[in-house]
Image: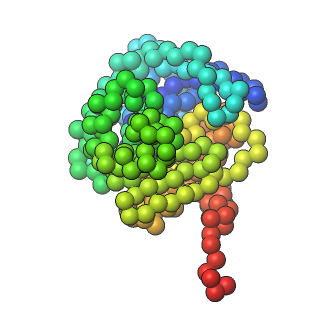
Amino acid sequence: MDLVIVGSVALDDVKTNYGSVKCALGGSAVYASMSASNFCNTAIVGVVGSDFPREHVQLLEKNKICTKGLQILKGKTFVWKGTYDDPNIAETLDTQLNVFADFNPILPDDYRRSQFVFLGNIHPELQLNVLDQMKDPMVTACDTMNYWIENTRDKLLEVIAKIDIFFINEDEIKMLAGEKNLYKAIDIVQKMGPKLIVVKRGEFGAVAFHQDFSFFAPAYPIREVVDTTGAGDSFAGGFMGYLAANKKFTEKKIRRAVINGTVLASFCVEDFSLNCLKNTNVQKIEKRFQEIQKVIYIADKNQ
């Protein structure tokens, strides 16, 4: 397995200015896995209840995502209900953890030998648990959110000290660092341990900061943003999937990974749930990649 992705699997009720969906497939591990599977052999680790529709498992498997690490427990699947008046701001109406409250990620033996692992937005103790199960991975990465920063800071710092890539949004990194200036915040968090910090900036793209270089990539321009649920996870999945496919952690590959991440996020937001992501392919991804590349390309001074 090239890439193992650990995180939540959910049934979402979402309402935006473009309509609504109920019991739609969601969760950080799902969005990230669907995006990553465009590039590499991907495995998902999560938990669902006995009410989880079989067709959702079939969708993952159809996209060549290994579901051997998907636990099915007696009870109900994690439910998130939210609404968006502003596409960039989700208002949570209801959260029902259900079987996810007792999630204990257990990796099959072949997953533990994977060279790349992405820890989605879950409790830092669970992230540490997964890292302890891995056998000498090449690249480890994690995502987080304001709740963990506020309530489990010490455990989160343990995770950050052990991983190579840290995904976080702009507001959260400022909160974590206790610094209002983005670049000062990045300097502070870099000292916490990660080799690479990737700041997700929504409609403004993403920024990757390494001690030796930095790279700014714009978002792919979408005129009608239907639903931004899972966009950050799709970005991280596209990023990690590309790196895992190439099995390199170099500046060139990181730059291309950032662009691929923004491309997958752009597909995510064009429709509810996985309606658009499930229809992506290498050709569609490459087309948008080339369009973004043209935007950031600077001609040789002699041209």
Whether residue 233 is visible here, answered yes or no, is no
Residue 139, above or below 129: below
Q: Which residue does the image show at 64% across and 77% down from the upper left? A: 299
Q: How many marks?
A: 0
Residue 108, above or below 64: above
Residue 288, image x, y percentages: 66, 58
Residue found farthest to the top: 75
- Residue 5 falls in which quadrant of the image? top left
Q: How is the image coloured?
A: rainbow
Residue 225, image x, y percentages: 71, 39
Left or right, 102 with reference to 169: left
Residue 15, above or below 170: above
Which of the pair 197/131 is nearer the observer? 197
Which of the pair 72/205 is nearer the observer? 205
Quarter holding the C terminus is bottom right
Residue found farthest to the bottom: 302
Q: Which residue does the image show at 40% across and 58% down from the upper left? A: 210
Left or right, 223 with reference to 4: right
Residue 205, above or below 170: below
Left or right, 224 with reference to 251: right
Residue 257, image x, y percentages: 50, 57
- Residue 243 falls in which quadrant of the image? bottom left
Whether residue 129 is visible here, answered yes or no, is yes
Residue 294, image x, y percentages: 66, 67
Q: Which residue does the image show at 50% across and 60% down from the upper left? A: 215
Q: Which residue does the image show at 30% across and 45% down from the upper left? A: 192
